[in-house]
Amino acid sequence: MPFFGNTFSPKKTPPRKSASLSNLHSLDRSTREVELGLEYGSPTMNLAGQSLKFENGQWIAGVSGGVDRREVQRLRRRNQQLEEENNLLRLKVDILLDMLSESTAESHLMEKELDELRISRKRK
């Protein structure tokens, strides 16, 4: 038993058998993708009943079936109507504020004229 000698000598590994026992390596790429499931498509997930799909770097709400599309169109039309109504109401508020400022200015002028008339009557 040598103390300083080389006692570690690993055994040589046996040569490997064939690279693969499967014939998948001989198939073309598209067939391999179908067989092995390498065609993932875009990622999708469901959150609170809403289907989301990742496309072109953004998460897009997935619409399943024709009912949801009609609902989206109905909501868009309703949103457009509400925006138009909101614009009309803003215009009316602007007009009313203009009328209020005009009548306020007229009342201030009348009060000023009244004060001047009272002062002129007291002097006489």
Image: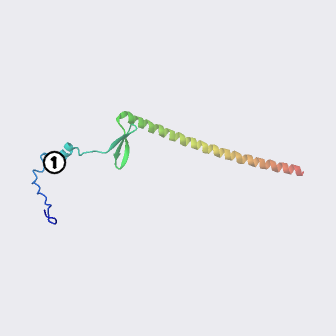
**104 horizontally vs 48: left or right:** right
Counting from the top left corner in percent of width and height, residue 13 is at 11, 55
Q: Residue at x 21, y 45 (%)?
A: 33
Quadrant, the N terminus: bottom left
Q: Nearer the viewer, residue 101 or 26?
A: 26
* Label 1 crowd (10 A; few <14 / some 14-19 / many >=20): few
**109 horizontally vs 54: left or right:** right
Extreme-bottom residue of the structure:
4
Q: Residue at x 85, y 51 (%)?
A: 120
Q: Residue at x 58, y 44 (%)?
A: 91
Q: Compared to 82, does 20 lie above or below?
A: below
Q: Which residue is mark 1?
A: 28
Q: Nearer the viewer, residue 51 or 108?
A: 51
**What's the image's color scheme?**
rainbow
Q: Compared to 74, does 41 lie above or below?
A: below
Q: Nearer the viewer, residue 100 or 117?
A: 100
Extreme-right residue of the structure:
124
Counting from the top left corner in percent of width and height, residue 110 is at 76, 47
Q: Residue at x 35, y 36 (%)?
A: 64
Q: Quadrant of residue 11?
A: bottom left
Q: Secondary structure at mark 1?
A: loop
Residue type of the residue flagged with mark 1: Asp
Counting from the top left corner in percent of width and height, residue 80 is at 48, 40
